[in-house]
């Protein structure tokens, strides 16, 4: 089986997931995992699918024919991550420009690889400023302790709270 990673984007409207799923199913693809979102009037996402080699060309061509979605196809590879070396955490703090750059810089300098990252800005009427909220999973390199990552993230600013899950 061939692994494919699709990146998709299109003006949001009802039925987009159904259109995509129908094409994948009609061409013997199997929907493995996805992360789909509505962002600023657009539907965007990433989908991992698998398909047998003989069906690969027809599925790829059919995905390119979708008119409501811009689909980019990447050929993936099967990889296993060591879950025992993963750290999942929630970060909350005052929102400000550059906060994602600061967080990702700390992780990069520690040698940690971001496996999953979701973020949003939340209203905080009692605080007077919006709050930044992120949930992340990172793959730690051998020898790096989770407390080192937590301390480094919290050192960015006094208003950032890091909770381990």
Image (tube, rainbow, N blue to C red):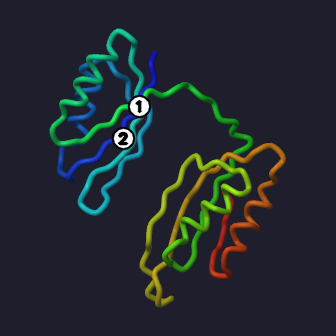
Spot occupied by residue 157 in the image (x, y as percentages of width and height): 66, 79
Q: Position of residue 41 (x, y in %)?
A: 23, 60
- Within 10 Å of disc 2 (Cα), the crowding (few <14, some 14-19, many 20+) is some
Which circle marks residue 74 in the picture?
1
Q: How many marks?
A: 2
Q: Which mark is residue 84?
A: none
Considering depth in this image, is 153 or 108 the residue closer to the camera?
Answer: 108
Residue 7 numbered mark, or none: 2
| Between discs 2 and 1, the one toward the N terminus | 2
Label 2 and label 1: CA atoms lie apart by 8 Å
Looking at this rendering, what residue extends furthest in the top direction?
54
- Vertical placement of residue 101 versus 4, above or below: below
Seen at 36% across and 32% down, the residue is: 73
Residues marked 2 and 1 touching at CB (< 8 Å)? yes
Q: Is label 1 in a helix, a strand or a loop?
A: strand
In this rendering, the answer to whether 156 lies above or below 36 is: below
Q: Report the residue that reaches farthest toward the right.
A: 143
Quadrant of the drawing holding the C terminus: bottom right
In this view, 74 is above or below 119: above
Q: Horizontal placement of 59 versus 157: left or right?
A: left
- In the image: residue 12, left or right of residue 162: left
Q: Quadrant of residue 5?
A: top left
User: How many other residues sit within 10 Å of disc 1, few (<14), some (14-19) or many (≥20)?
Assistant: few
Q: In this image, 88 relative to 110: left or right?
A: left
């Amino acid at each position: 089986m061939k692994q494919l990673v699709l990146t998709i984007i299109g003006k949001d409207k009802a039925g987009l997931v159904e259109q995509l799923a129908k094409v994948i199913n009609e061409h013997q693809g199997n929907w493995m995992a996805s992360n789909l979102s509505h962002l600023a009037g657009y539907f965007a996402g990433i989908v991992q699918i698998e398909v047998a080699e003989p069906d690969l060309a027809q599925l790829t061509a059919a995905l390119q024919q979708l008119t409501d979605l811009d689909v980019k196809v990447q050929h993936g590879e099967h990889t296993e991550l060591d879950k025992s070396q993963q750290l999942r955490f929630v970060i909350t703090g005052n929102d400000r420009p550059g906060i994602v750059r600061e967080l990702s810089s700390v992780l990069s300098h520690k040698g940690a690889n971001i496996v999953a990252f979701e973020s949003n800005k939340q209203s905080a009427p009692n605080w007077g400023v919006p709050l930044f909220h992120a949930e992340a999973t990172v793959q730690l390199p051998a020898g790096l302790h989770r407390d080192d990552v937590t301390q480094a993230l919290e050192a960015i600013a006094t208003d950032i709270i890091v909770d381990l899950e």
